[in-house]
Amino acid sequence: MGQLYNVLLATFAATGSFLFGYDAGVMTDVIASPNFLHYFQTTSSSSFVGAVNSTFSGGAVVGSLMGGLTMDRFGRKQTIQIASVFAILGAIIQCSAVNMVMILAGRIISGLAIGLCSMAIPVYQAECADPTVRGKIVGLTQQMVGIGFIVSTWIGFGCHHAPDTSSVQWRFPLAFQIIPSVVLLVGLFWLPETPRWLIENMKDHQALQVLHRLHYNGKNADWIEWQFNEIKSAIKAENEIAAKGWRMMFRASQWRNRLLHGTLVQVFTQLTGINVIGYYQTIMYQALGFTGNKNVLVAGLYNCVGPIANFIFIFFILDRVGRRKPLIFGALGISATLISEAVLNSLNPDGTRLGLSIAGVIFLFLVSIIFSFSFGPISWLYTSEIMPMPIRGRGNAFAIGVGNWLVATVFAQVSPVALEKLDWKYYICFAAFNLVITLPTVYFFFKETNQKSLEEIDLLFGDGGVIAARSQEKGENLNELSRQGDVRRNSVEADHIDFRAPGIG
């Protein structure tokens, strides 16, 4: 079936990413609903509203870390299905809420679901993808997150036309989460598990069948056989010397290095400020003088520009330019845009200068566009592809759970207060971090992984932790281990040329 099946599989799996985007974006309109605020006797800048978003992110921290266990034990596919069940339960509790406790409990459970999805789906896509199109495949994660935001906003906008006396304004948007959750849960029964997980769990025949379904184009049977043997030998070598569990990924230097890379790219993604804008953009538009339905309408337009930019980037640019250059561009571009936003807000404190208000909205839109050309798709892609097989589940769980969701939890809680107290100065905090921390770290330390198989990325990081693990567990001589790593690298590269030339290339 080849590349078309690859794309269709990844697109359907990304229904979980759609759910991620919808679930994260739906509260933007809910907290702007007059009926919601009246029903729960709160305001859009209250600590309760901050808790609604922070409990969601806190649940996602737990879900991500839990996924490190379920992905290794039950597989990538079943982990996503477990997430779907949590999502259905969380949505039912939220849309039927009669008090604050039910809202917060529902958000925590939904957060568990999204935490599982956010770390399992990119891994599922990366392990199924051919290296030549892995950027497009895993980039679908961010694409569907953006589409989820779009749908949540326009459903919210439509429901805002209901009378202020009707709870339809917020109950229907929250109930809509059930639909993609059910579709994902049921549809995954017809999709395969990843070849790498099947091989690790001694299901070689199934793994070879899946590789054929994913990559066969009528003339590359030799390449598929080589890929199967390469995956099997890499997993066997690593499993022979690597202890299972969380401790090993911190003890082996190469694995620890990869874990640091994956965690940092997630932290840097949050420090662009994109989630703060996503959660609290209606508050930002109010500061610019946009209120009522006009506020929600602008939020709906904002949520459209990111997915459009992301689509252009992942399908026409990403696999050509790699990972590092877009991240450098993103750090510089978002910093410049946030500084401009701060200046505009400082000159327009009461939001009465229409020209400056419109310019302020445009710069917030520009942040979304630049993010979609950089950190948005690459954060999921880079994290999922740099982890070696023995720690891919737990490594992604830690990087996304701690680097993404734990940091998001902090900003979700403090941002309503920060926007009220610091006003335009809050934008400067994010710009400064990008320029002082993110930019030099990416430029000097991040590695380029574009167009490399997951096994070749092992070699890029120093033989995928095998060398480090041997030195930790057996005390072998480091110089000899390095020589062995060089021999293996040369051998694999030679084999790669022989088999790939007539293959899918």
Image: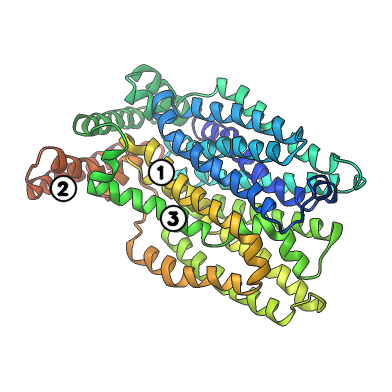
In the displayed structure, does residue 113 sit left or right of residue 419?
A: left
Within 10 Å of the Cα at label 2, are there few (<14), some (14-19), or many (20+) other Cα atoms? some
**Is 431 situated above or below 208?**
below
Label 1 neighbour load within 10 Å: few <14, some 14-19, many 20+: many
Name the residue located 26 percent from the left edge and 34 percent from the top edge: 234
Name the mark nearer the viewer: 1 or 3. 1
Position of 351 with respect to 249 (left or right) is: right
* Of the image marks 2 and 3, the number of the one nearer the N terminus: 3
User: In the drawing, what numbered circle is on residue 130?
Assistant: none
The percent position of residue 233, horizontal first and vertical second, equals: 24, 30
- In the drawing, does residue 180 fall left or right of residue 37? left
Residue 282, can we see it? yes
**Image location (x, y in percent) of residue 449:** 37, 51
Tag shown at residue 265: 3
**In-front residue for pair 302/128:** 302
x and y, in percent, of residue 349 in the image: 74, 78
Specify the quadrant of the image occupied by residue 463: top left
Helix, strand or loop status at disc 1: helix
Q: Marks 3 and 1: in contact by CB < 8 Å? A: no
**Residue sitting at x 56%, y 68%:** 334
Amino acid at the residue labelled 2: Asp
